[in-house]
Image: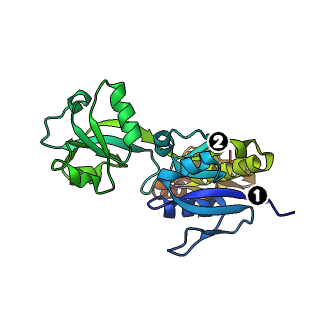
Amino acid sequence: MSNPTLKIALPKGSLQESTYRLFAHAGWKISSSSRSYFPRMDDHELEAILIRAQEIARYVEDGVMDCGLTGRDWVMENEADVVEVCTLVYAKQEARPVRWVVAVPEASDIHSVQDLQGKRIATELVGATKRFLAQHGVTAHVEFSWGATEAKVPTLVDAIVDVTETGSSLRANNLRILCTVIESVTVLVANKDSWEDPWKRRKMEQLAMLLQGALRAEGRVCLKMNVPSDHLGRVTSLLPAMKGPTISTLTDDAWVAVETVIDEKVVRDIIPQLKAAGAQDIIEFPLNKIIP
């Protein structure tokens, strides 16, 4: 009897490298050549394929894949009937949701959603855009954009609906954000029949737990230090921690060991303060996963 496998779709394109890094922190090594759509994973229970994020939800719904990582926006766009196992807030630039926004030229006389009535709009997110406009009682011509969407206004279309993390690219193209259509994060989605299979469900739940743990650890480090017992209050008052620092006794009763997890961005400020408060032998090391 062959070993069971879970077929997982990974996003090819802008999210590919950040997805590989996330899996590496979670404990799975992924390797592939630049032209291969079938990456190798160091887990014989996982069978991966690279697919454009726009298509993953559809293939998961149809049962071609057991599960996949894609944007919630593409699940909505395809109206895919899948199980959302967990959210994974990461993107190609920053760990924040992305937004699909209506953008118009800076000089445009379009200043509200209602001003889009009868206008021509280009986007990859055709279905969701049409539903958004319908909710506002607006009828417009929404056409699919094959790329270079920002370059189509104002010559070819009146407005675009495009995805952005920071808005910097839109501003660089002299575009003004009118409103947000939807916000989206990466989600792990499962085929409904696969989710009812006990082995596959357990494997997907393990994936979700470890991937979320890897995301919790991003931007955090662990600090360990030795502290004179009579300086402990001064040191711990400086330490932000998830549930309070861990304090351990040493063989020398005059000293204790202190360990805590903190945001990496505060380390450069807090270490000198800890040293001044009496901490010694301070060690900083990165984290791969935090599992609550």
Residue nearer the viewer, 89 or 272:
89
Where is residue 204 drawn, in percent x and y? 70, 50
- x, y (%) of residue 221? 57, 57
Give 97 or 8, whichever is nearer the viewer.
8
Label 2 sits on what residue type? Lys
Q: Is residue 287 left or right of residue 252?
A: left
Q: Quadrant of residue 47?
A: bottom right
Residue at 76% over, 48% down? 202
Any part of residue 286 in sight: no
Q: Quadrant of residue 256?
A: bottom right
Read off the residue under disc 1.
250
Can you give x and y, in whole percent of width and height, for residue 101 in the image?
32, 41
Q: x and y percent of residue 174 in the render?
A: 18, 50
Residue at (13% x, 35% y) in the render: 109
- Give the residue number, with chain letter if any, for mark 2: 243
Query: Is residue 79 at least partly visible in the picture?
Result: yes
Q: Residue at x 68, y 48 (%)?
A: 209
Q: Mark 1 or mark 2: which comes first in sequence?
A: 2
Q: Residues within 10 Å of mark 1 (few under 14, many from 20)?
A: few
Q: Residue at x 65, y 47 (%)?
A: 245
